[in-house]
Amino acid sequence: MKFIAVLLLCVLSFWHSEWLLISSRESIVFFFEQLLPSMFFLMVVIRLFVSVVNTKSHCLDRIGNSLGMDGQALILAFSAFMLGFPGGALLINEFCRKQAIDVKAARRLIYCVSCASISFMLMTISTLFHSLSFALFLYLIQFISVIFLLSATRRNRIEMQKEQKAISFFQSFSQAISFSLHAMAAILAYLLVISSIRSLLLIYFSLFDSLVLLTLEFSSALSSLSQSTLAISAQFICASALLSFGGFSVHLQVLGSCEESRLNYGIYFGYRMIQVLISVLLAVIVCTFVSF
């Protein structure tokens, strides 16, 4: 069955090569004009932050204990939250590969800490919906939903293993650059694959183009949402749901790039649906008291 599906995909790719070439060009332009400038530096800084901040803090440990982790694991979770998807998942998976956290801990963090990056929220969302407060409230909702998921799973405690030997700042900086380059290369590769799949789906399922755009790629869905005639409160609630779900493109990137964490897609999907429900509920509450 897998062989037939891959063979069919190859045939369709050759048959519609011109359309795929156009979509790939658009994806490359989007990557170099939007994603790379907004994500790469942030990724380097956050990866460097996780490496450099290696001190014991009673305050961090107390906060971490309430979420079922030590202070150092809390820093990793917060850093993954700031990076957003899929960079945050790649960061967690890297620490799993280095055996700083075990597989069970990595799975828990990736399942729970899933949201858009702070740069996407503050730059892209505020631009699309012409409101910084709109973006800030959405980011606050994502933060609360992540905290809820971490609190609900706190019985599975996470302990970070310390480095066997201290490394210099320049070594940490080099590791941060290497990680960020690898992560951005993986994001570009998946972006090209997903854009091609989206083009094929739109060719053969044009009647369901709205459904394809909504479920496959969250940034395109948010762009369409911002141009819709829905009331601003309805846009806020829908945007909150889209950001929590992430889209199947994000799911593919996370599960395809985090082999060491041995993720289960059924569980990952379940967490996203729970996060959608929490986010929609919080969005309704916000819209009751706040007008944008």
Image: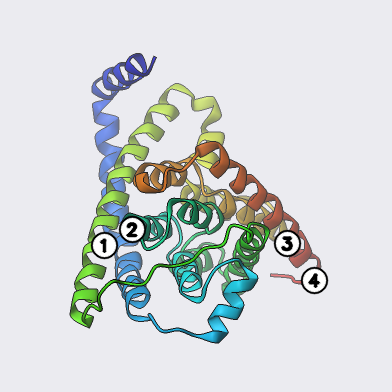
Badge 2 density bin: few <14, some 14–19, many ≥20, Cα 10 Å: some
Q: Tell me where residue 253 appears, x and y as whole percent.
A: 39, 45
* Residue type at numbered disc 4: Phe
Earlier-in-chain disc, 1 versus 4: 1
Earlier-in-chain disc, 3 versus 4: 3
| Mark 1 vs mark 3: in front | 1
* Residue type at numbered disc 1: Phe
Q: Quadrant of residue 80?
A: bottom left
Q: Residue visible at 74% across and 70% down?
A: 291
Q: Tell me where residue 148 appears, x and y as whole percent.
A: 67, 62
**Disc 3, SS:** helix
Q: Quadrant of residue 146?
A: bottom right
Residue at the disc numbered 4: 289
**Disc 1, SS:** helix
- Left or right: residue 69 versus residue 16 is right
Residue at the disc numbered 2: 94
| Mark 1 vs mark 2: in front | 2
Label annotation for residue 92: none
Earlier-in-chain disc, 2 versus 3: 2
Q: Tell me where residue 104 appears, x and y as whole percent.
A: 49, 51
Earlier-in-chain disc, 1 versus 2: 2
